[in-house]
Image (cartoon, grey):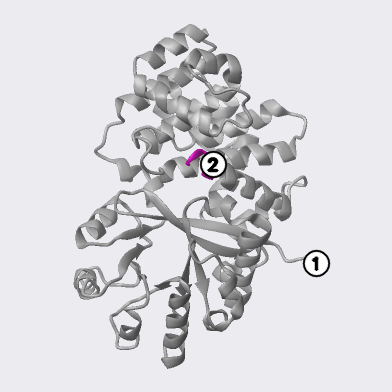
Amino acid sequence: MQQQFFLARQPILDRKESLCAFELLFRSGSKSAEAGVLDDTHATAQVMVNVFGDMGIANVLGANKGFINLDAEFLYSDTVELLPRNQVVLELLETIVIDDAVIARCRELKAMGFSLALDDVLELGDDIKPLLDVVDVIKLDLTQIAPARLPELVKEFRKYPVKLLAEKVEDREQAKSCMEMGFDLFQGYYFARPEMLSGKRADASKMVLLRILTLMLGGAENDKIVNAFKEHPTLSYNLLRMVNSAGNNLAVKISSLGHGLMVLGRRALQRWVQLLLYASGTNGATVSPLMQLAATRAKLMELVARQIRQRDLDYADRAFMVGMLSLLDVLMDEPLHDIVARMSLQEEIEAALLHRSGDLGDLLALCGEIESCDAAAVQRRLHSRPGLNADTLNGAQLQALGWANSIAM
């Protein structure tokens, strides 16, 4: 029997809180302890085979870099040299004992054009000092370092030409503190937490888009929707740019909102409005990690829904909407219940969003478990879904990642 596995991505943000990389994580569906990784070499091999072989790096990473864990055996393997040097960061696990041979191998890989990172660094010890002119990123796990010690440790590492990555940032206060200390990179899903936006009011463009979405859901006439867009001309531009750049085999370029409504239809345009909610405010200059998460979640829910009910396109559309709207509370910085109350949503969609209840609520919970790398929970949920298995879920996840990457370009 083929072993089941799940590929997870954990986002890495820069100082502008823009998405710049992912750590690629292996998760076994057969074990619950320690994410099922009993053999680091086997785990890394699985990730490499699936990301750089069957899945395709463009789908999984898009234009971002990918951090890949290496144990000692894989560090010396010729296989690692097959990886695309311009898009991966080789992350040396803390289990590697740094000696002369490891240092020599790292210098060799660096000369080949690879970027290197050290995982779970706790101190500036003599063992890692010979690597500080070779590695590019030092990862500091905030859960393993005393808060009082952290500023001094950052100051010590600032003497070397390395980037510092704060790992397992739990909330906005930690993120702000790490920013002030001088960290360059931040890892985790803290950007998707409501407190990340506390104290900020949703900008006017998001409020207009939410009103437009409510008009569309309520069946308003096309001219009312176009007039609402005219209140914020930059939104019209951003929507046209997004639709034209990822407009799936459109025969003509869309030149106006009225034209877009006619060519795309209400269903497709409604999806782009939902996406633009998460993209607005970035001015097209950066990739919004929140948009990536919402888009991936929505597309994955749609694809899984199609697998479960292959002839029910309306069900797939509702699944997409639930996934896309499920992060509105983070985006708007107000309770989801208050946002939903102002929208014309079906009861089934409301129940899924507010209570994770019903079939769509179950699919939304599945997405959350995948995002949090809870392989055991994913496996349990798959057992309750006869029409779904690990292979079909992985295939759907690949498509969802590729789609989310394509619209972010």
Q: 179 left or right of 367?
A: left
- Tell me if 296 is positioned left or right of 162 in this view: right
Identify the residue under disc 1: 1
Q: Position of residue 299 (x, y in %)?
A: 59, 39
Task: Tell me which residue sits at (50%, 12%) in the image.
Answer: 258
Q: Residue 257, percent across and down?
A: 48, 16
Question: Which residue is disc 2 drawn over?
Answer: 406
Q: Is residue 39 visible?
A: no
Q: Mark 1 or mark 2, which is nearer the start of the sequence?
A: 1
Residue 386 is situated, as x and y percent measured from the top left of the image, at 77, 47
Measured from the top left, where is residue 317 in percent x and y? 63, 29
- Give the number of callouts: 2
As drawn, 356 above or below 253: below
Rendered-image quadrant of the N terminus:
bottom right
Q: Residues within 10 Å of mark 2 (few under 14, many from 20)?
A: some
Q: Residues within 10 Å of mark 1 (few under 14, many from 20)?
A: few
Which SS class for mark 2?
helix
Q: Which mark is residue 315?
A: none
Which residue is more in the foreground, 61 or 251? 251
**Do residues under tags 2 and 1 come within 8 Å of each other at their CB atoms?**
no
The answer, for residue 194, to whether it is visible in the render is yes
